Amino acid sequence: MARSAQLIAREQFEAALLVIREASKEILSLLGDPVAEAKDPQWFLQQLETARLNIGSWGLVAKRMHISDAELSQFSVQLRHLQQLVPQYEGGAEVSSTALIAALRFVSTLELIRLRQPLLHYSTELVLTQPPQQRDANLQLRGLELTLKGLIREAWPDEVKLVDHLKLLFGANKVRRWLKFAKPGDILSGMQFSELAQLLVDKKEFAGHYASLFPESGALSFLIEPRKTLQTFLDDVRLIRNHVLNQQPLTTVQMSLLENYSAAITTPVQQRYVKGKTQVYPAGLSECDDAQLNAFFAEAEQKYRNMSGDMFEIRDVIDSPRHKAPRTREEREKLVAGTLWGAVGIVSIAIAIAGLHLISKTSKPAVASPPAAYVAPSEPAEVRENSPRQQLHRLGILWDESHFRSAIDRNDDHIARLFLQAGMTWKVSWTEQAMEKEQHDVLDLLLSYRLQMNELKPCRRMISTMSHALAQGQALTSIRKSYLKAFCIRPPVVQRQESDYTQALARARATGDKRDEKWAAIQKSIYDEIN
């Protein structure tokens, strides 16, 4: 007899809580705060704060755990989210889908930390009556990808119009690359999973075509809005899928997460199918025999290798190459000044030539041997063939934004410099990961090519991301200050930040809450840098 969904959810949740309790004891011991018995997530969060105070900073906590500041931030955010959803848990109580996913995601992060820090030995395997199976996970991955393709195809049934639309969103270069790997008449077959997902969760695309498919209910209420929840879930699915395509077995945590993600994403679509409101049938797309499943993954693995993996995270918006930011006031002033100085130079040269001509006419010519014919020096062939783009080509690196961003993320200033020297433009939002990891080499390089930064309004997102990073214990480093001064010393930005600081200060005075006071101090520190 099949067990109910609630019984399965309760068993998975309690197994995850058991892992979290065992892991919390070892982690606290590692941080110099050993405990005899672990309790609920709220207790763990409080003990971590105590350990942080004893050690001195979150940076030292991250160092002991052998993780980056960004990974520690993700760890603490996930733990805080879990304790908000489940402050306390009594055995046998009902478990919501959001609480279950929060617990499983946190166990997945604990799994990563254990792999990084060899002094930690806790197990993250979930002890379940009926453990999930790899074949079921593969079916779910196949079903999710086919569901995404079905939804996109339903929104864009005409192939020609879809290709034109993709050119507008992603640029002609990417579309040509997809067509190279695609089956005839099916450009979606040439796209990677992250690119299909990005097309679905992009803010404008989601609002225009897919919002009605995913109401804010059940697991889709995990984050502030269904679109953001989908983005988070699909990016986690991308990472799990990469494990499978790299021939790595999935853990019980990964398979349990995938099972819940699949249900959260496909259930609302399935309900609309039953009501006759869509032709996409997720239940049918998740069923196939072994031959079909093997053929699907053989094709997926081949494309994965040919396209050098599916490494880029799914973002809020598609980075379209067609939008070029207007020149700032500083850039306009530089252009006008350069033009004027150029005109002055030309006039000066003309006067000098006229003076030399007059002198040569009045002076007695000297007898001289006939001058040798002037031969303009030719540029060596090796110089012509050693341009930045040629160097990238010889290294096997495609001329596209994806490879440029990958170089930025891994702090490869040599490759990033070649892209910049060849004229590639960049966006401040691409530096978020580098900022978190304090990758000064590539950040300083980008700053030296600031005139090639073409993001339309970089400051709102940069200040928001920076504020949350500071709230998580990161520092307002010199490189962060440099980026603020480089791009955000403009009257509208300064006025908006002054308003944000004023509101935060008023809220802190009204509530007296330490967190509000900290937030106000963060807003003031940013305001002081750009004012």
Image (cartoon, rainbow, N blue to C red):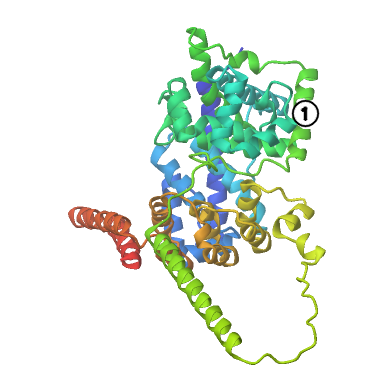
- Check the image and name the residue furthest to the left: 510
Residue 230 seen in render: yes
What residue lies at 53% left-to-right and 83% top-to-bottom? Answer: 355
Per the image, the residue denoted by label 1 is 299
Q: Nearer the viewer, residue 331 or 268?
A: 331
39 left or right of 500? right
What residue lies at 50% left-to-right and 22% top-to-bottom? Answer: 6
Image position, residue 64 (x, y; %): 57, 63
Q: Which quadrant would residue 239 be assigned to in this image?
A: top right
Q: Is residue 47 above or below residue 227?
A: below
139 left or right of 468? right
Image position, residue 125 (x, y; %): 65, 39
Q: Is residue 383 above or below residue 320?
A: below
Q: Nearer the viewer, residue 263 or 340?
A: 340
**Viewport quadrant of the C terminus:** bottom left
What residue lies at 61% left-to-right and 91% top-to-bottom? Answer: 363
439 left or right of 389? left
Label 1 Cα crowd, 10 Å radius (few <14 / some 14-19 / many 20+): few
- The local secondary structure at tag 1 comes to helix
Total numbered labels placed on residues in the image:
1
Image position, residue 56 (x, y; %): 45, 69
Residue 96 seen in render: no
